[in-house]
Amino acid sequence: MDSHEGMGSEQLETLSRVFAEQLLACLAECGRGRRGLFSDVSLEDESHAWPEAARLRELAIALQAISHQTEEPNALCDEFLDLCTIHGESHPGEPRLAREFLARIGRGEVGTPTESEYKPW
């Protein structure tokens, strides 16, 4: 038996709540300028390491796996992990991403498309 099969909905709700609380705390800190929430890219100075953010990403990956196995997707977790994949020159920057994500959470928009659907016609 898979270790996740025996997880009850109450345990999944608790795990989801803990994730959401930690995410909100990290988003607030990142929004104030701390980097390293959405990416584990090594910073030049080890004193800037953010172990809470690394643990949050690990928790998100585990929660996503459990949620998909139980067919109870967690939109907050899924969107956070999607934001963790944004990299490149046109990247808006972690503080801005954090502030925008917090605003979407506050407006209750998590789980809805962030961009309008492209229609070529």
Image (spheres, rainbow, N blue to C red):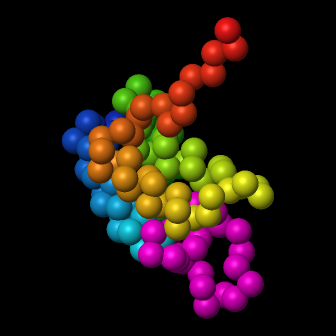
Find residue 67 and report its horizontal and vertical position in percent. 42, 36
Judged from this view, the residue extending furthest toward the top is: 121
| Residue depicted at x 48% and y 31% | 113
Tell me if residue 37 is in the magenta stretch.
Answer: yes
What span is in magenta?
A: 31-54
| Residue depicted at x 30% and y 41% | 108
Query: Toward the viewer: 44 or 90?
Result: 90
Describe residue 106's horizontal placement relative to residue 97 as left or right: left
Judged from this view, the residue extending furthest toward the right is: 89
Residue 106 position (above or below residue 30): above
Query: Toward the viewer: 48 or 54?
Result: 48
Helix, strand or loop for the magenta stretch, by majority? loop
| Residue depicted at x 52% and y 77% | 34
Find residue 55 and report its horizontal and vertical position in percent. 50, 66
Q: Is residue 70 visible?
A: no
Describe residue 14's horizontal placement relative to residue 115 as left or right: left
Find residue 64 and report its horizontal and vertical position in percent. 48, 41
Q: Quadrant of the C terminus?
A: top right
Residue 31 position (above or below residue 68): below
Residue 47 position (above or below residue 111): below
Judged from this view, the residue extending furthest toward the left is: 10
Describe residue 109's horizontal placement relative to residue 43 as left or right: left
Query: Toward the viewer: 51 or 118?
Result: 118
Find residue 57 and report its horizontal and vertical position in percent. 53, 58
Tell me if residue 41 is in the magenta stretch.
Answer: yes
